[in-house]
Amino acid sequence: MASPEEVAAMRRAIAVSAQGLGTASPNPPVGCVVLDRHGRTVGEGYHARKGEPHAEVNALAAAGRSAAGGTAVVTLEPRNHHGRTPPCRAALIDAGVTRVLIAVRDPTSRGEGGAAVLRQAGLEVETGLLRQEALLILGPWLASLRAGRPYITWAYSATSDGVPLGPPVVGAPADLAALRAAHDLVLTPEGRLTEGLPGGHGDGGVFHVPRMPTEPGPAEAMDTLRAAGARSLLVEGTSRAAMSLLAACPADRVVAHLPRTLVSRAPCEGTAAVAALPEGYRIVDVALGADHIGLTADRE
Ligand SMILES: Nc1c(N[C@@H]2O[C@H](COP(=O)(O)O)[C@@H](O)[C@H]2O)[nH]c(=O)[nH]c1=O
């Protein structure tokens, strides 16, 4: 059972992990908090970019010797295999951590996962702590693994009769900049691909911005984006490129900006109801802007 301090630390690790969104791909955005033997926070870290230290390694470096006898609280199961960096479970064992709390299992772990190896080394390990909350950050990365293509968010503004009209409203530039920065790639209303946060993935050669392939089709275009390192794509507006891509690869999430106007009389008796969202999406968040209502909805 996790203590209240450990639950709070996991929520903090989830918050910290968000800083890897839009830059960590093709790796996952992971966060870690290290508590000392008295349950005090002594280090925090997140994974910023592939090739750079993992979340646990950054948090342990911040904690220094205070990690000995303490607890590591990490959003994704520590890795047990060698990749670009050494396995994180070794770093945890070497630092003398005695307890590890994990939110989400890593489906890419090779052989026995890091959790099993940590247990064999005598550490106490609990998995599944605040899993649903951690999936708010790790969900798109996991979904892109399952689908074999980037997780797609479609952002548009709609007319008062619910028809998708174009890119999200100009009245919300800060929201739009944040949305872009949380995605690896953006398909702009002009049909160009740009990095969500320019330069965010670094120049280590593990990520590049391809040209949006037009031939032979959207499925192959998704393969190209995936091979370029992208695990998330923001599609803005209703350009021809956007609509043909979405017809073949439906968005996982939509962010719709609706005008703050109300229908007071049906345009014509008996016409279809005004839809706030495309069919098959359920609202997960509603935000009120000065000149729009922002709906976030996930594919059912
Ligand atoms: N970023 C991250 C993990 N990511 C795991 O590491 C794999 C990539 O390893 P590498 O090639 O060394 O960068 C990636 O596919 C995923 O399984 N694991 C963790 O324990 N903590 C982290 O912070």
Image (tube, rainbow, N blue to C red):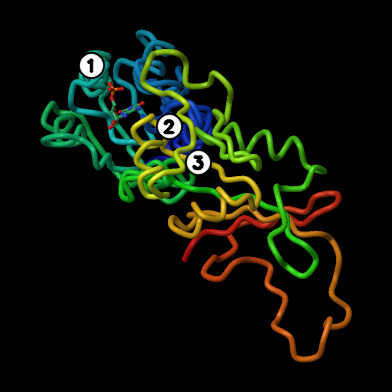
Percent x, y of residue 28: 38, 33
Q: Does the residue labelled 3 lie within 8 Å of ligand 1?
A: no
- As helix, strand or loop, the secondary structure at mark 1 comes to loop
- 6 or 144: nearer the eye? 144
Neighbor class of circle 3 (other Cα within 10 Å; few <14, some 14-19, many 20+) is many
Q: Give the residue at the far front of this rendering.
A: 215
Q: Which residue lies at the image location 44% right of the left edge and 39% below the top edge?
A: 213
Residue 7 percent across, percent down from the top left: 45, 40
Does 213 appear above or below 128?
above
Q: Is residue 1 visible?
A: no
Mark closer to the chain start, 1 or 3: 1
Image quarter for ligand 1: top left
- Contact between marks 1 and 3 (CB within 8 A): the answer is no
CA gap between label 1 and label 2 equals: 17 Å
Q: Name the residue under label 1.
A: 86
Q: Mark 3 points at which residue?
A: 233
User: Is 281 left, or right, of 60 in this rendering?
Assistant: right
Nearer to us: label 3 or label 2: 3
* Amino acid, disc 2: Pro
Q: Which of marks 1 and 2 is nearer the N terminus?
A: 2
Q: How crowded is mark 1: few (under 14 residues within 10 Å), some or many (20 or more)?
A: some
